Image (cartoon, grey):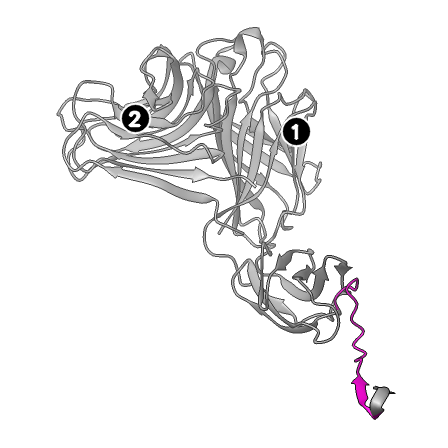
Amino acid sequence: MAIKRTSNNSVSNSVKLSTGFSSAAIPNTPTIGTATATSDVAATVEYTAAVLGATGSTFTATSSPGSVTGTGSSPITVTGLTASTAYTFTVTAGNANGTSSASSASNSITTSDPLAGFYSIASHTFTGSTNTITFSSIPQIYRHLQINITAKIAENINSGYGYILATINGDTGSNYVDNRLVGRSNSSFAGATAYTNSLWLFGSAVTNGASLNNFFGVGYLKVSDYTKTDRYKEWFSLNGLDNNGIGESDLGKGSTWIQTAKWKNTAAINSIKLDTYDGNNFVNGSVISIYGII
Amino acid sequence: MPLTFIPLATSTLSSTATQLNFTSISGSYTDLFMVVNWKSASNNIDYPTFWVGAGNSIDTGSNYSANHFEAGSTGVAVYSYDNATNTTLPYGQAIDSPNYAYMSVWLMDYSATNKYKTMIADYRTDKVNWQSGVGTATWRNTAAINCIRIGQSGSFDMAAGTFATIWGVLKA
């Protein structure tokens, strides 16, 4: 406080509080509060804005791991978290001049287990020249997996059948068993065939040729109990194609396949690679999506 | 982690009818999944059948093909239909109450505009002649599907109680 004598012996007080405030300053760091898990994918994060310093206009909570963010007033809601996962959060304050440093980390919370249902994990639409897609780091929080396929492979029906090959956890050993029941379009019946000690094949589904533009094969495959470590992994698929009678073979003109297969390994599945048996590329527009089922 | 298997519509026949229609199906999903419980109102053998279309216009032209195989009381058989006017996938029967035929169908990438639409189905019925089967069908049109019609191949009615439910499946 400065006291200044003025004329006529009057005295005025000229007061300046040192607050550290500046119109060009960034806000001070907020104080972290309590974090609370509110669902399988969301949490709330409380904070207290700094009393001193520039005013924060935007407050952001950031998760660790994942760096998933939410903004707003306390409590901030953060959505898009992963179920059954432990998180801590920090909060920053921002204004037009910048962003404060992050608060200390919150208490740790764990999101709840996911609700029963059918969840999308990842999807890939082929737009370039490639013959493979790998779904890696598959979350271990579901009971079963399902892969939906709409696919076509750039190969001539005379040189291949458009098989899609599955490789689990990078295992290229002779640890697969595959058996199939196939119905062909020409009313002959292929019957059941068992393949042992070979990589598992998804099945037919795709062919190529000028007269076959726009025809795609479809199918789905299911993997049960993919996280269990006390059993081999069982697969089931239903897939097929119908080319309206066009094609060089009855199989390529139209066929429907039922397949069961086994990966003879008790490890949890965390990676599934799908590629073409003959090495030819997937045609643009092919779509492969993987889902988790609880 | 939002659910990605979304119920879109259910329709149940309260009385006999020749058609059961779904229209204005959203194109927001990757695949459609449909379950049908079906029964004919007649004593004639007939086939559960369905059609699809774009712009709420069902296509009854010769733009379908299908193949399916089944195990039944008379053995194993394979069927194939080219340039058909509908997707007759399952082998249906005139089924008396409370026996309904069951069919589930995946319509993959149904809203894409760069490919014909292919669907894959499984089905069963166990009245008169029992069958369990699977089949694949293609609609030769690149337009996005936004309507589905369920009926039967003959001119007979479907029985009251026939119903269908459609789900949309989102991708990540």
User: What span is in magenta?
Assistant: A9-27
The residue lying furthest to the bottom in this view is A9
Locate residue A82: give its quadrant: bottom right
Instruction: Quickly name the residue at label 1.
Output: A275
Above-or-below relation of A31 to A135: below
Q: Where is residue B2 in the image (x, y as percent from the top left)?
A: 50, 50
Magenta stretch: includes residue A18: yes
Q: Which amino acid does label 2 sit on?
A: Arg
Is residue A248 rendered magenta in the image?
no
Density class for disc 2 (Cα within 10 Å; few <14, some 14-19, many ≥20) is: some
- Pointer 2: what residue? B149
Question: Dot 1: within a 10 Å radius of its alpha carbon, few (fewer than 14), some, or many (20 or more) residues?
Answer: many
Front-most of B86 and A97?
A97
Question: In which quarter of the view is residue A183 placed?
Answer: top left
Give the answer, above or below, for where B114 lies relative to A159. below
Number of numbered tags placed on the structure image: 2
Name the residue at 70% across, 59% down.
Answer: A65
Q: What element carries label 2?
A: strand
| Dot 1: element | strand
Q: Please state if B116 lies on the left or on the right of A36 as rendered.
A: left
Residue shown at 51% from the left, 57% from the top: A114
The answer to whether residue A259 of the structure is visible from this angle is no
Q: Which residue is drawn at 45% across and 20% down?
A: B143
Q: How many angstroms separate mark 2 from mark 1 (CA)?
A: 36 Å
